[in-house]
Image: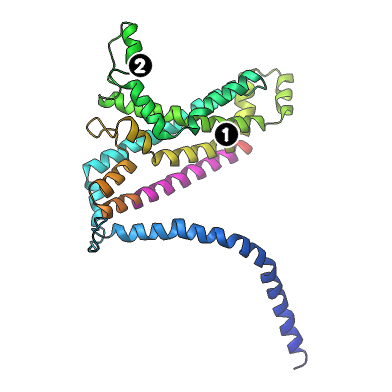
Amino acid sequence: MATTVPLARARRRPAARVWRDRLPGIVMGGPAVLVFLAMFIVPMFLAFVLSLTDWNGYSLNFTFIGFDNYTEAFRNPRTVDAAIFTAAVAFCGTVLCNAVGLFIAALIAGNSRANTLLRTIFFYPYIISSLIIGFLWSAMLSPEGAVNGLLGHLGVAPLPFLTEVTFAKASVILTIVWAHFGFNMILFLAGIKSVPTEFYEAATVDGASKWQQFRNVTLPLIAPVFTVNLVLTLVGLLKVYDVVLALTDGGPAGSTQTIVYQILRDSFGQSELGFGAAQSVILLIVTAVLGLAVTFARRGAEKKVAD
């Protein structure tokens, strides 16, 4: 009996010591966990609950209708068209933002005053409000705007940048790329700057050209930056709304409505908050799946490059 008590105490002491060691981390991380629960998990749960109802956003009376809103989301032609255009914006925008960002980052990676000034100029659109950018380009691309005025002076007929479906879609995508590629450029520039100069010196000794150095040295070593840029850009463009609101307001004939634009219009413009919540849940799931898929695909590419 005398030997069992000390053994039990000896077993309890390590557990108490472990919890004592973990206590500072729990105390420091607790507020962040609470904020995450309050700002993300709880609203997400409430959105799912609302998606199962026909609540209009104003009345206290609502009925649980199951998954009818989800069925309607996949059948509603307006929602389907908005989802297709959102996919086009996300795909084209992600490709163009990263391609333009990488190209410019490679051009202005040198240490000179001119390159420093160019970095500021190219990054500046990203820090401007998207609404301001939308209104700015709306004024420039309107039928009597600055761009068509310049074309008129050159003897070219005005182009329907915002009034014809194909032109309007292209205008939205290119405006979004113009507003966002600066962020990609800065990340690529940071990745290029982090590559040790010894690799370039060795490649120069081996007779590699600048293009060969960029392809065989720079690109493999900044592979993780590609992953971050692709995921952040894709997720961000799936939620684009404000540029569309200010540039085309979803027109012409609803052809440039994105899924978030459609969600807000259905939720508050049409007083169908339950239907809007269902679309939001679908968008959340699609965004998470695509983000994880791109991340895992890029991680596999990174491992192949490392091997």
Badge number at residue 12: none
Tell me if I can see residue 70 in this picture.
Answer: no
Q: In the picture, which quadrant includes the N terminus?
A: bottom right
Q: Which residue is mark 1?
A: 187
Give the residues drawn in magenta, as a range. Answer: 281-303
Q: Which residue corresponds to the image point at 39% horizontal and 34% vertical from the top-left?
A: 131
Q: Is residue 44 magenta?
A: no
Which quadrant holds residue 105? top right
Q: Earlier in the sequence, mark 2 or mark 1?
A: 2
Q: Which quarter of the rendered picture does the C terminus lie within?
A: top right
The answer to whether residue 217 is visible is yes
The vertical placement of 151 against 17, above or below, is above
- Report the number of discs: 2
Q: Main secondary structure of the magenta part?
A: helix
The amino acid beneath tag 1 is Leu
Q: Amino acid at mark 2?
A: Val
Residue 284 part of the magenta-drawn span: yes
**Residue 259 screen position, x and y as percent:** 32, 42
- Residue that appears at 69% across and 75% down: 16
Given residues 212 and 69, the one toward you in this image is: 69
- Place of residue 193 in the rendered image (x, y in percent of width and height, measured from the top left): 66, 30
Q: Residues within 10 Å of mark 1 (few under 14, many from 20)?
A: many
Left or right of 205: which side holds 250?
Answer: left
Judging by the rendered image, the residue that carries numbered circle 2 is 147
